[in-house]
């Protein structure tokens, strides 16, 4: 109830992604100050946290407020949940309608509150390592039916382990960054030699991802029970995919050039404290996982997700899919526990993605390869425009939010335009 009635002195328009109940973290710069600095979104503004660092006087953060002058969130994430929760309480206090410390200080307000239209957003963290899971049973089943066995789509290990692979952190980019169509080898005619050129089957993957807070030492796993203490917050993620390159290369070692040419994330990291009211029971897991993956507390989240495409030359985006994060078979706590059970060390800022999020209905699928059934059923985007896969100039937009009583917790944009492949001469 307290969350629903909480209000800020900063104007928050109805339906905003960023009410005082959210307060996601990000990194920004401005035209008059190119330095990357830490901010928090509130309504249509960004609070420059470095400008109000002196107001963080709680016992956990006292003497540690230099973390707010850093160019990334890594140092804050490394401090752990007590610091994150104290920072959130401090922010909610100084931004509340009842608190004068910032509200009535015009000079400080002019320094600290910046219109979002006046900022450039950057990657929120230095992402050391990036792992992509494959945790939607619906998505894995859909692809298994297409490429393997229509009657037995899941491999035997899928219901026992959160399957994943290591991606490239170097090609993770912030929303709004153009994604260049990749060149690569494909094999259009089975049994014939491969050819080289631009991918003809560029796809999106609707995903979410979490950023790791405190890490673990080499050889020391993180338990499923303790995993939430190591999860700082979540972003939207589009793991762009070149399906023709992927198909030719992925046996025997999995995704490579078909995936690592670009991964887009939303700029604002929504904290697990902000998402706590939206915890729901995950899907029933059958068979029951091995003991190290058995969780006593639910860790699934009711997050509404949508995908839109704005075709090249189009005036407005067209929604092509709506789904929900709650459908994921494996939870983030299970993913983190499995990733570290062999002693693999995590570090603050590591990014772990969910895998494509598909729901149970035809309009809730998280990729074009599913929505168009491998390109055999083109999507009708209106005005005679159809798509099997993405074309140059198309913009792909992801959106997500949790709906509370009288407020919503949103993630901001996760958008990218497909740019033409470079012409390579050999």
Image (cartoon, rainbow, N blue to C red):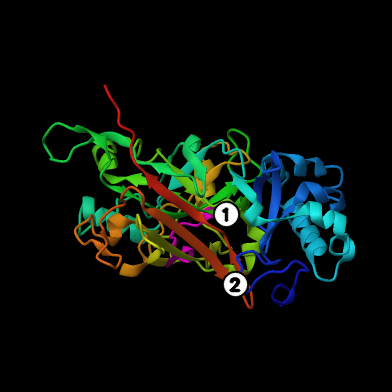
- The residue nearer to you, when weighing 315 against 226, is 315
Identify the element where label 1 is drawn. Answer: strand
The answer to whether 98 appears left or right of 398 in the picture is right
Outermost residue toward the top?
A: 426
Q: CA distance from mark 2 to mark 1?
A: 20 Å
Q: Is residue 328 magenta?
A: yes
Task: Write down the quadrant of residue 23 in the picture.
Answer: bottom right
Determine crowd level at label 2: few under 14, some 14-19, many 20+ residues with C-alpha closer than 10 A.
Answer: some
- The residue nearer to you, when weighing 287 against 31, is 31
The answer to whether 276 appears left or right of 253 in the picture is right
Q: Mark 2 or mark 1: which is in front?
A: 2
Task: Write down the quadrant of residue 263 in the picture.
Answer: top left
Q: Is residue 415 magenta?
A: no
Task: Write down the quadrant of residue 260 in the picture.
Answer: top left
Give the vertical position of 361 relative to 294 (above or below). Answer: below
- The residue nearer to you, when weighing 332 against 312, is 312
- Which mark sits nearer the N-terminus, 2 or 1? 2
Residue 272 on image: x %, y %: 63, 58
- The residue nearer to you, when weighing 152 against 36, is 36
Residue 223 on image: x %, y %: 59, 49
Marker disc for residue 15: 2
Residue 410 on image: x %, y %: 58, 64
The answer to whether 178 appears left or right of 29 in the picture is left
Query: Where does label 1 land, which residue?
Result: 234
Q: Which residues are magenta?
A: 323-333
Instruction: Report the residue at 47% width, 53% height from top.
Output: 415
Give the vertical position of 126 relative to 119 (above or below). Answer: above
The quadrant of the rendering that contains the C terminus is: top left
Residue 98 on image: x %, y %: 85, 71
The answer to whether mark 2 and mark 1 are in CB contact below 8 A is no
- Asked whether residue 360 is in view, the answer is no
């Amino acid at each position: 109830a307290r969350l629903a009635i909480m209000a800020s002195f900063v104007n928050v328009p109805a339906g905003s992604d960023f009410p005082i109940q959210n307060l996601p973290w990000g990194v920004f710069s401005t035209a008059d100050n190119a330095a990357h600095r830490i901010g928090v979104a509130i309504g249509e503004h960004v609070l420059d946290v470095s400008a109000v660092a002196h107001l963080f006087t709680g016992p956990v953060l006292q003497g540690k407020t230099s973390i707010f002058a850093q160019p990334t969130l890594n140092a804050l994430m490394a401090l752990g949940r007590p610091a994150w929760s104290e920072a959130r309480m401090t922010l909610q206090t100084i931004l509340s309608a009842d608190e004068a410390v910032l509200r009535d200080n015009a000079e400080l307000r002019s320094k600290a509150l910046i219109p979002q239209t006046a900022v450039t957003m950057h990657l929120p963290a230095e992402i050391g390592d990036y792992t992509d899971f494959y945790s939607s049973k619906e998505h894995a089943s859909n692809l298994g039916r297409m490429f393997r066995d229509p009657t037995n789509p899941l491999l035997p290990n899928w219901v026992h382990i959160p399957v994943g692979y290591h991606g490239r952190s170097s090609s993770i980019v912030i929303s709004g960054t153009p994604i260049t169509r990749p060149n690569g080898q494909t094999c259009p005619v089975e049994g014939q030699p491969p050819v080289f050129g631009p991918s003809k089957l560029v796809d999106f993957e609707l995903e979410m991802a979490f950023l790791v807070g405190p890490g673990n030492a080499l050889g020391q796993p993180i338990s499923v029970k303790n995993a939430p203490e190591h999860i700082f917050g979540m972003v939207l993620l589009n793991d762009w995919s070149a399906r023709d390159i992927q198909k030719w290369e992925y046996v025997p070692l999995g995704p490579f050039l078909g995936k690592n040419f670009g991964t887009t994330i939303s700029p604002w990291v929504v904290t697990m404290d902000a998402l706590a009211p939206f915890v729901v029971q995950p899907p029933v897991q059958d068979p029951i996982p091995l003991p190290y993956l058995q969780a006593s507390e639910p860790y699934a989240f009711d997050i509404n997700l949508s995908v839109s495409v704005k075709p090249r030359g189009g005036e407005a985006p067209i929604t092509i899919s709506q789904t929900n994060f709650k459908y994921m078979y494996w939870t983030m706590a299970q993913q983190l526990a499995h990733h570290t059970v062999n002693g693999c060390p995590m570090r603050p800022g590591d990014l772990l993605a969910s895998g494509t999020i598909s729901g149970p209905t035809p309009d809730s699928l998280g990729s074009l390869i599913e929505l168009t059934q491998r390109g055999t059923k083109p999507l009708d985007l209106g005005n005679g425009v159809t798509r099997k896969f993405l074309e140059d100039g198309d913009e792909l937009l992801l959106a997500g939010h949790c709906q509370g009583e009288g407020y919503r917790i949103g993630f901001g944009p996760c958008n990218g335009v497909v740019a033409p492949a470079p012409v390579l001469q050999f």
